[in-house]
Image (tube, helix red, strand yellow):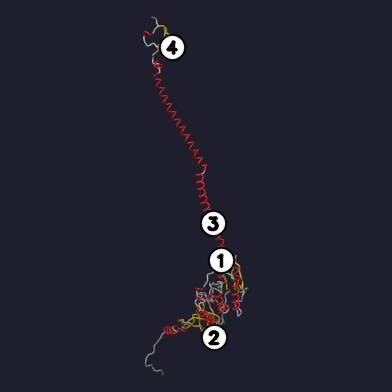
Amino acid sequence: MLQSPLFSLPHLTVSQLTFRIRKLLEGEPELQDVWVDGELSNVSRPASGHLYFTLKDRGASLRCVMWKTDVTRLRLSLQDGMAVEAHGKIAVYEPQGQYQLIANLIQPKGEGALYQEFLRLKAMLEAEGLFDVARKREIPQLPRQIGIITSGTGAALRDILNTLRRRLPLAQVILAPTPVQGVEAPPALVASLAAINRQHPDVILLARGGGSIEDLWAFNDEQVVRAVVASQVPVISGVGHETDFTLCDFAADLRAPTPTAAAELATPITVLDLATGLENARTRLTSVTLDLLGDQKVFLSALASRLRYVSPTRRIETEKQHLDELARRVASSFVHRYQLQAAHINGIARRLESLNPLAVLKRGYAVLTRKSDGSVVSRVKQAQGELNVRVSDGEFGVVRNP
């Protein structure tokens, strides 16, 4: 028979107990940043976009969930039975009283060790200053020669060549076909970088398509990274897809998210830009030339006017005009003087006319002269014998009888 305890024990509801368990689990730092190895099972991706699966091994199973935002960055096609490494934090799903792993990264089993080696190399090379922004070189705006280091049979090369042909067909391409995966890739990449540097191109594209961390590991090789840094020519790294990062990306002068993007970054100025620039230059040159010709035409016209002003012909024309002006003035003066003289003569004529004896006769007077000697009879005693009487319209004779 159970005896009642001396002190009463706490009574918790299911929710309270689950909440306390959640606080204990989620408050443990080591459980909030953990890698879990296991085999996938019950992989499910509903319409919400979240991912649900179970990790299991021979002794246990663990419910897992990955939210949609992390699923979009997932590079794997997950299937039941796949051995993976999942990174995340432990949480409790209170409605069902279950603990679970909220995963934010899933990779094939074995990538965890490679990732740790990646971080170690990155820290070491970064401490040496190999990734410093200050040592990065500018990419030439209009490269004449472009070096390409990639697989000679991969899709990356085809994409790069198509992009360069479309954007800048004038550029010469130097290709160094190189293994980009496997144990033979690192020394081949180092040799290709040295060989292309001897050709002195304007820029080098170091590229390959996407893949797992093992596929891309040659571009994390320490010797390859040092060769990129030692290159005398600017290097653009276009390795993998947008979410892939390699140590060569940090060492290169410029990182591109894809091989195609690397080709685009290597050709900032396209043939279309050149054509547009030439057309704009032609337009500006035409405009400047027309303006210059217009200014020179005005200048020459001014010089011609000045020459005409001081030329002998202009002097002769001026003197001729002056002579014509003097002639007009002489003629005008003569006419004016003639008119004055005519008016003066007319005045004298009018005065003479007023003194003309004949004019007196027109008023009824007559002039009597002696026919014998033509003397004018002004006294009675002179009026003897035959006389002539002159009136306004003629003469007639008279005889005075004693």
Q: Give the amino acid at mark 3.
A: Leu
Helix, strand or loop at mark 1? loop
Q: Which residue is denoted by mark 1 in the rendering?
A: 142
Relative vertical location of residue 233 with respect to residue 96 in this rendering, above or below: above
**CA separation in Å, label 2 and label 3:** 77 Å
- To which quarter of the image does residue 198 belong? bottom right
Instruction: Please give the residue where the numbered disc 3 appears in the rendered image.
Output: 285
Q: Disc 3 and disc 1: Cα gap in Å?
A: 22 Å
How many residues crowd around disc 1 within 10 Å: few (fewer than 14), some, or many (20 or more)? some
- Pointer 2 or 1: first along the chain: 2
10 Å neighbourhood of mark 4: few (<14), some, or many (≥20)? few
Separation (CA) of disc 2 from disc 1: 57 Å
> How packed is label 3: few (under 14 Cα within 10 Å), some, or many (20 or more)?
few
Query: Which element type, helix, strand or loop, lies under badge 3?
Result: helix
Residue type at numbered disc 4 = Glu
Q: Position of residue 172 (x, y in %)?
A: 61, 67
Tag 4 residue: 395
Looking at the picture, tell me which residue is in the foreground, 162 or 233. Answer: 233
Tag 1–tag 4 contact (CB < 8 Å): no
Q: Are marks 4 and 2 in contact (CB under 8 Å)?
A: no
Q: Tell me the SS state at disc 4.
A: strand
Residue type at mark 1: give it. Answer: Leu
Q: Position of residue 111 (x, y in %)?
A: 55, 81
User: Which residue is label 2 attached to?
Assistant: 57
